[in-house]
Each structure stands twice: as C-alpha cells, then as structure tokens.
Image: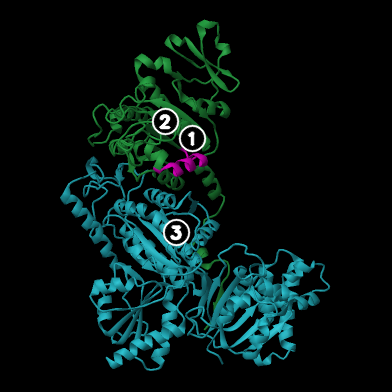
Amino acid sequence: MQSEVTVLFAGDSGDGIQLIGNAFAQKSAEAGHSVSTFSDFPAEIRAPQGTVPGVSGFKLQFGGESVYTAGDKADVLVVMNAAAYKKYAGHLKPDGILIANESGFDGRNLALAGYDNGAEPLAEARASQRVISVDIKKNVQAALLELPLGTAEKNRTKNMYVLGLLAWMYQRPAQDFEKYIQEKLAKSKNVLEANQMAFRAGYGLAETMELAAFKTEVSRATPAPGVYRTLVGNQAVALALMVAAKKANRPLFFAGYPITPASDILHELARHRNSDCLTFQAEDEIAAAVAALGAAFGGSLAATASSGPGISLKSEALGFAVTLELPLVVINVQRGGPSTGLPTKTEQSDLMQALYGRHGEAQMPVLAARSATDAFETVFLAAKIALEAMTPVMVLSDGYISNSAEAWLIPSEDELPSIAPPMVDGTPADGNPFEPFVRDAFGVRPWACPGQEGLEHRIGGLEKEKNTGNISYDPANHEEMVMARAAKVQAATRFYSPTQTDSGNNSGDLLVVGWGGTYGSIKAVVEKLQGKHYSIEHVHLRHIHPLPEDFGNILRGFKRVVVAELNHGQLVNLIRSTYLIDAHRLTKIQGQPFEEAELKSALKTHLQAIQHG
Amino acid sequence: MANPRDYASDQEVRWCPGCGDYSVLKQFHTVLAHLELPRHKTVVVSGIGCSSRLPYYVNTFGVHSIHGRATAFVTGLVLARPDLDVWIVTGDGDALSIGGNHLIHLLRRNVKAPILLFNNEIYGLTKGQVSPTSPEGQVSKSSPDGALGSPFMPPALALGAGASFVARAMDRDPEHLRLMMIRAHEHSGSAFLEIYQNCNVFNDGAFHLFTEKESRAHHSVYLTHGQPLLFGIENSMGIRLDGFTPRTVNLSDGYSHDDLWIHDEKDPIKAHLLARMHQEIRPFGVLYAENRPSFQSLAQNLSSDKKAESIEQLLQGSRTWIQSE
C-alpha cells in the first residue's frame, strides 16, 4: 500500500490533458483520497503543436492524510508526445512509471520537440525506468472503427484512453468514470460514445496486457463525514466574496482587468452575475479599483483582483480607500516579478508591496491564503474585516493556489461567521449635520450611503477634520487622523483566531515560519522530520498585518527560527525588525514551489547547527 | 422651484476672486433647485483640480476623488446604484490628460451622468502649466518657449469616443449655461458639457473672444435645433455648408436663412464638422444628442434576468459528493 501517489499528465495543449486530470482528481476525491492538484499551462496561448512551449501539464497527488500539495517528483508520468516527455522527464522519480503514447514519438514529433536526428528517448528511458508504451492513436482508431466519425475526431479521444488505463491501475470502477464522461460530454451522442469507447479500450488494455505489476493500492484518507465539492483557488476567492456579501446583506460589486493568473476570479463571478453580484471589466487596473470604491460608497461589498503589476497601478486608489475609510477587498494573485516577469509561475514577492506599496501613512490589513480551500476562509474573513472595520484589506494568493484544486467540506450557512457592517440607521437628532468620521470603540466610522435622507455628506482625498469629515489642514488634526486610521487597523486583531503551530508545540529547537501557498510543502517536510524525532515545528501565518499578538511568544519559544518563502526574503525581514530576533531566511526564486528534498536538506542543516550550537 | 441656497453647503468657497468657477457653481445650485432634485439622492463626484473642489460646496452627497478618476468612480457607483442622480465635475487636465482613458470609456459605454468639464486651458491648482487644451505655442511655467503639439478639441474627442451628447457653454453666459446643464441632465446617457471657464490668475482671457460682450456676437454661434447657424450683430452673419466645408457669409450679400446650415443635433456627421470649428468662430449649445440605452440600464437588464442564488446554492455549486462515516 502506497501512502500517496503523484501523477503528472502532460501532452499538447489540444490533447485534453486538463479534462482527464480533473476527472481523475474528482474521482480520486470521491473515492475517499485526499487530493491536491495543480495545472501548469503554457504561457503562450497556442504554441505550435508538438513543440515544448505547447505542452500543457496537470499534476495531482492523492492518497491518505499526508497529502498537502500536488506533490513534487511524480510516481507516474503520462506523456502524449515527445515534447511533453522532454519538458517533464526530469519530474519523474528514478523508480517512477512512464506511460508514453508511442505515436507521439515518431520522427516528426521528435523533430518538433527538438530532439536530434536518431534520438530515441523512450529507449533510453526503458533502460532505467519502468515504461508502458502504447500506440494510443492506433488503438483508439481500431476501437472506434465502427463509429461514423472522422480520423481527427477519433484521435481526440486519446486522452480518454489514458484515463481508462489509469483508472484500472488504481482500481477504480469503470462505471464511475463512464458516468462522469457522460455528464461532461452529453451534448453530442457520437462524441460521447467515442469517448466512452476509448475509455473502455484503455481500461481493457490494462486488464489484458500484463499490467498487473503496475496495479497499485493507495491509502485513503479518513475525511470528516459530510458533503464535499472541489474548489480551485481562484474559484474559492470568488465564492467567498459572494457568500460574504450575502452574509453582510450587501450586494457584491467586483471590478477587474484581465491579468494572469487573477482573471479566473472575474470569470467565475461573471458566470454568477445577477442583481446581487455585479461584475465590471474595467478599462484598466486603476479604473477597476476606483470603480470598486465608487460601488463601496454606494453601499456594496466592493472587491477587485489583480496580480503584482496591476496592484502597482491600483496603489494610488488604495491610498484613497485608506483615507475614505470605505470597505474594499483587494486580491493579489502573485506571480513571478518584477514587471511582466513570469506571468504563469508562482512567487511570493509582493509581500512588501502589500504592506508598504502606497504613499503616505496608509496601513491596511494584509492576509495570505495558504491553499485553495483556505482561500475561501481567508477571503471571507478579509471581507468581514473590510466591512466591519471600514477599511481596504489586501489578500495575497499566488499562482500556485490560483490553479490548484482541493476537496472541500462544504460548511453550512450557520457555521459561517456573521458580518455586520456599521450601517447608519435613521438621521441625526435635531437636524444636526451628519458626521461621517465619528468613531466607535474600535475606531470604526459609520457607513452612510447616498439615498439615505439627512445623511448627505462629502468625502474626499484631502485630509479630513475628525468627526465632521470637512477639509482640514490643521497639523494636529492630521496627526490625530493618521493615528486613528492606524489604530483602527491594529484593532483588526480582534477578528483573529489564536495562532497555532501545526503540531501544537510552542517550544523546541527549530520553528519554520511560512505564509501563503508554501503551506503544504513545508508541512509535509516538517512532519517527516518530526517522524525522525527532530525537534521541529511549523507555523503558517494568515495575518501578515497586523501581526497576531500571540505570534511573538511562539517565535521566542524556539532556539532558532527559519522563514521559508518564495522570494528573496520579505517576511523574514518583517519578523527580524518587528521582534528583534535573528530569524534565518530560506528562499527560492525560480517561479516554482519548494521541493521536498531541497526543503528537507536546508532544514536539516539548521537542525544540525542547533545541535552543534 | 426649490431655493438654490438649500443646495449650498456650509463650507466657505475658496476659489481666487474673479474665478469663472463661481459662476458655474452658482448656476449649478440654481439648476439643482430648478430640477428640485432630492439632495439625498444626488451625488456630485469630481477629480482633482480647482474645479474639482465644487462637490464640497454642494449640500448633497459628494466625493472629491483622485486625479482623473471621477469618471471611473462614477461608473462603479452608478452600476451599483442606478437609482441615484450622479454628476461629474472635472477640468481639462483632470478629464483629458490624466483621466483621458476613463473618460473615453465612460463615453463609449454611455454611462448616464452629466459631465461638467471646466475648460480653462491651463493647470491652475498647480500654478500654471500647459494643459492638453492649451493652444500650440502657449507660454507657461512648464513651456517657457511655447507649448508643442496640437491641443485637444474636447467636443471632437468626445464624439470620437462615441459620446451620445456633446454640448458647449461658457461661464460668462449664465442663462445659456443653466439651459445646457438642464439638457445634460435630461439626457439618457453620458452628457459631455464643455464649459469655457476663465482662469483670471494663470490664463486670463483665454476665451475672451467668445465670452466678452464686445466680441461674443462676432465669434460665438449659438446652436438651436432646426434653426440656421447665425451670429454677428443682430444675426447679420451666417454659416453655410459648401460640401463639407463651413463658410461664413454675410446675409446682406443676398443670402437667406434657407441658404444656411440648418442645425440638426441628431446628425452625427455634421456634429463632427461643428466640433472641429476650433478657429475664431466657435459653436455653443448642443452639438450632438443621440438617444441610446445607458450603460447602467443595460447592466440592470442583464442582471434582472437572472435569479439570485442563495448562500446554500452558492456553497454547494454544481457537483458535490457525500463522505459517509
């Protein structure tokens, strides 16, 4: 029994890799496995067929409780052509299984993939690895001989053939998949039939060929009972915004401008568009942020999303949001930067931007999601903080989270926290003018919207006199207002749950601090090192600003603190300057998640240093 | 009619003495009173610049937003709140330079809102730099040897962006200015109203030819729908169309009204000709007015077709499975 398995599907953009990846992930989750997936799309939209830039990949890890990421090196690599092999050969474990489509390794495909004349990559692979190579093209043509479809259409079912093979290897009932295919392809009878027949052919081949040696049993998790669904990171963000708006009894207004990897948030919300959920594709990033503020002034839960370069453009508007003290949720799906950088790759290099990338004294709460399903909770909480504390809030996601999927235990409506924004009821007594900047005990101002009689007021970017909100150039008033806005943000810690280390230890040798999409990688490695009796613990921060009040004590309980992040060292500097402790940096800036081996070896070095310390 | 003073806020108006903005503000208060707009349902939104201080002086809801972005702010506000009466106040630098992109998109989308563009052909609040409407060669602090490049002709820019309503007025003709504000407010979509406004400190007299009593009649053509283009003392001059070229004629040379260009504010081609009359004779009034659905009404229609989902429906999504004990 294997505790977890990583499968990497790869093929040409047109090979239907994402479809079978998702199908396999879905069925694995339904079979009771823990599942985590990641899609690796090419940056080019339609790179030439058969070439390396045109390869699309889908990775998933499934198994028992220890599945925290989409895995790193694959146990099984499926390649539909030579280019896919070339791109991902290095991602297969030395003892892994390679499943290759032979017809994708003919002379033409080898040349397109950039192999030298006479190269035989499959033969080389066979020398050291277990290889299942099948002429899938020939086999599907044979299996679909009777169907009234063209050769090209029949060829398009190659992916289903592969899915059949995998389903057999991991002992999944064929009927489950056939039903799934039916739901996905119900539109055309012929196409549906072809896909089901191709699936059966793949399944049957595995059964009849001597593939029994490859048949593997994989641990299942013991997930909590309940109703589950799959959540992709960007979808989780969209869902959280919609649900938070309903909980707050406010309409949702989302404005965005197309940018990778954040656009799917706009797409998902646009799909749900109705009178409670308005979406607006603005003319630029600036307009998206400002239009959202306009809607916030009108009483909506307003949100905008982008990636680093887009957030830079929005930053003037964020300063404006800080001084208006209107609720606004800003999502940054981080990618490799600066500038256009690595648009389809993941990075955590916008933390300093989130904290400090504005003009003037302009604090706002900053939260970071750790995984696809955690993105729901984090964004929901961000919306609650924005609405109840009347402030813009920044949420950091990243390219990895945005495209990864996890099974999610659906909460009931009552389990979700209530959201009560400070709406103004009635009008000021005695016909006094309404004062929009009078603060409550938490420093929060009231939210009055156009249409409310007697509450007419003017707000703007100029410094406001306390209470009245009228323009004020008074020096002491400015300082007071700056401090009041900062204190209001600091008071957001009242929304936090206690900070918890993964295993509950608050002292020991080594503490690994992480934030964002590296959660699974760090957790998996720390658990393995704990299994080898090292004194090591992991804490993952959701709240980057303000930092949790209990965080300092946790840091001080350990002999050494290492901050692991996918940048040049940003949270580590914040921790060093805030707590005056000698936190160490563990960084990677390659547009890729941490790999188990590299994390493990870096952490071992620290553990040894402590022992010899 | 309500009392214009009810629309004035308690804030002290702070423009330079003699500024054209005072006149525009006064006419604005009067128009709001004339239209009897409920104060709580009215929002005045501006960007940055001298003119953009105006919302502070109006006793409705108001937003003094950021430079160039009033248009973007309003787009979000009216999408979320199509029930409100929203006005945009902006200037030549605010709308046509830093906010140019938002303006053209607002116009093409036809977001329903009057846009009062105070054009003084100069940056006043920053103390005298050339603006995108300053004439070529204009000497200013930032252009001591004269401005380079052609200025925008705001009505031509608006028409090019697909504006459904384009008009021009001036600070020195209050009655006509009020009329134009009312027309802009009546319009079903974006209503672009350029207002010639004198900056007596940094660009005094930029429009004197068109606005002052002694020269106005000779240089300003007041447009009326269905009427010939007339100007001059006692309307002694007219404009006729020679193909697509406007020609000035003297009626005493034997021309009758029938020989002249009859203004049709629904004619998009002729609107372009009017918008490009940017020399010593310029048109005032409604250059173009076209009825087409506003952005917010289109958005509302789109949304109202669809049923709102409950929290439960949203959380469940389209595909779930059950994990039993």
Residue B271 on image: x %, y %: 53, 27
Question: What percent of the width, then of the height, locates residue A387?
Answer: 35, 58
Q: Secondary structure at mark 2?
A: strand
Where are the magenta residues, as a range?
A: B98-112
Residue hosting label 2? B194
Q: CA distance from mark 3 to mark 1?
A: 30 Å
Classify mark 1: helix, strand or loop.
Answer: helix
Please tell me which residue is depicted at 57% across the width and 18% down the height of the picture. Answer: B241
Residue A461: image x %, image y %? Answer: 30, 47
Q: Does residue A125 appear left or right of residue B25 in this picture?
A: right
Badge 3 and badge 1 both on one subunit: no
Q: Is residue B104 magenta?
A: yes
Chain of residue at mark 1: B
Q: Is residue A86 visible?
A: yes
**Residue B185 or residue A531, whichever sits in front:** A531
Residue picked out by circle 1: B158
**Chain that bears disc 3:** A
Check contact, mark 2 vs mark 1: CB within 8 A. Answer: yes
Q: Is residue A38 above or below residue B296?
A: below
**A186 or A586: nearer the eye?**
A586
Q: Is residue A442 visible?
A: no
Please rate how many residues cluster around mark 3, counting C-alpha atoms within 10 Å: few if below 14, some from 14 to 19, many from 20. Answer: many
Q: Which chain is green?
A: B
Compared with residue B254, is residue B93 higher up or lower down, i.e. above or below? below
Q: Colour of chain A?
A: cyan
Amino acid of disc 2: Glu
The residue pinned by badge 3 equals: A305
Viewer-proximal residue among A414 and A532:
A532
Vertical arrangement, residue A518 with respect to residue B54, above or below: below
